[in-house]
């Protein structure tokens, strides 16, 4: 009976003992999940062509969109914790495009032109298809523009600053190390 009461007391102590502050901070960061470091504005002219043997359709648009670069904090690895110095060192994957979107209100259709014998035909289905293809291509362009290596330093600095601000509120310091991107 004494063994059972000791076991119950130990269990109660574990339940009542608050977790270490570093554990609470790391859990809060992981619960944040996604942290956006920078937003890349994209503006670029794009032309999409649907050609047949006797003509075709050409759509030219001025693409406007945004790519949001950030990290998934659930992928964070805690490398070290110093409870006395209140310091945490984490390892994060490099920022990646979390959201890439075309802004339909800002994207302008500059030209929608049929050529060859297609000028004589009513091809509304093909018109809708070419416009849909142009917008799909535009989405990929926004993603690619956001993923360009030139945006990495700004995204990393912004993420590091945001994490520093979050942990400083609890009286902690955080140092971020970045994983090497896979080829």
Image (cartoon, rainbow, N blue to C red):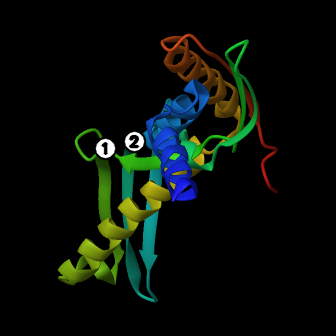
Q: Quadrant of residue 95?
A: top right
Distance, label 1 to label 2, CA atoms, is: 5 Å
| Image point (44%, 49%), residue name | 100
Label 1–label 2 contact, CB within 8 A: yes
The disc placed on residue 103 is: 1
Percent position (x, y) of residue 145?
57, 44
Label ID, residue 65: 2
Dividing the picture into quarters, in which one does residue 89 lie?
top right
Q: Which residue occupies 72% across, 14% down?
A: 84
* Residue 90 screen position, x and y as percent: 71, 33
Between 168 and 38, the residue placed more toward the observer is 168
Q: Is residue 67 visible?
A: no
Of residues 15 and 40, the one drawn nearer to the viewer in this rendering: 15
Task: Determine crowd level at label 2: few under 14, some 14-19, many 20+ residues with C-alpha closer than 10 A.
Answer: many
Dot 1 or dot 2: first in sequence order is 2
Between residues 64 and 130, which one lies in front from this camera angle? 64
Residue 169, relative to residue 109: is it above or below?
above
Viewport quadrant of the C terminus: bottom right
Q: Position of residue 139 (x, y in %)?
A: 43, 56
Left or right side of 173 for 52: left
Pinpoint residue 4: horizontal percent, then vertical percent: 52, 58
Q: Is residue 118 visible?
A: yes
Secondary structure category for the residue under label 2: strand
Number of callouts? 2
Query: Residue drawn at (18%, 78%), measured in percent from left and top?
Result: 124
Disc 1, SS: loop
């Amino acid at each position: 009976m004494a063994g059972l009461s000791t076991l119950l007391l130990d269990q109660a102590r574990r339940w009542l003992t608050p977790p270490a502050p570093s554990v609470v901070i790391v859990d809060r960061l992981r619960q944040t999940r996604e942290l956006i470091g920078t937003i890349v504005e994209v503006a670029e002219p794009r032309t999409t062509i649907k050609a047949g043997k006797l003509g075709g359709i050409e759509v030219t648009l001025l693409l406007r969109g945004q790519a949001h670069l950030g990290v998934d904090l659930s992928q964070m690895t805690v490398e070290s914790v110093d409870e006395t110095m209140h310091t945490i060192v984490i390892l994060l994957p490099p920022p990646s495009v979390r959201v890439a979107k075309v802004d339909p209100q800002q994207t302008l259709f500059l030209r929608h032109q049929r050529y060859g014998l297609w000028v004589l035909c009513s091809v509304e289905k093909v018109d809708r298809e070419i416009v849909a293809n142009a917008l799909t291509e535009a989405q990929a362009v926004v993603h690619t523009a956001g993923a360009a290596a030139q945006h990495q330093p700004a995204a990393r600095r912004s993420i590091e600053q945001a994490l520093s601000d979050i942990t400083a509120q609890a009286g902690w310091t955080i140092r971020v190390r970045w994983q090497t991107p896979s080829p």
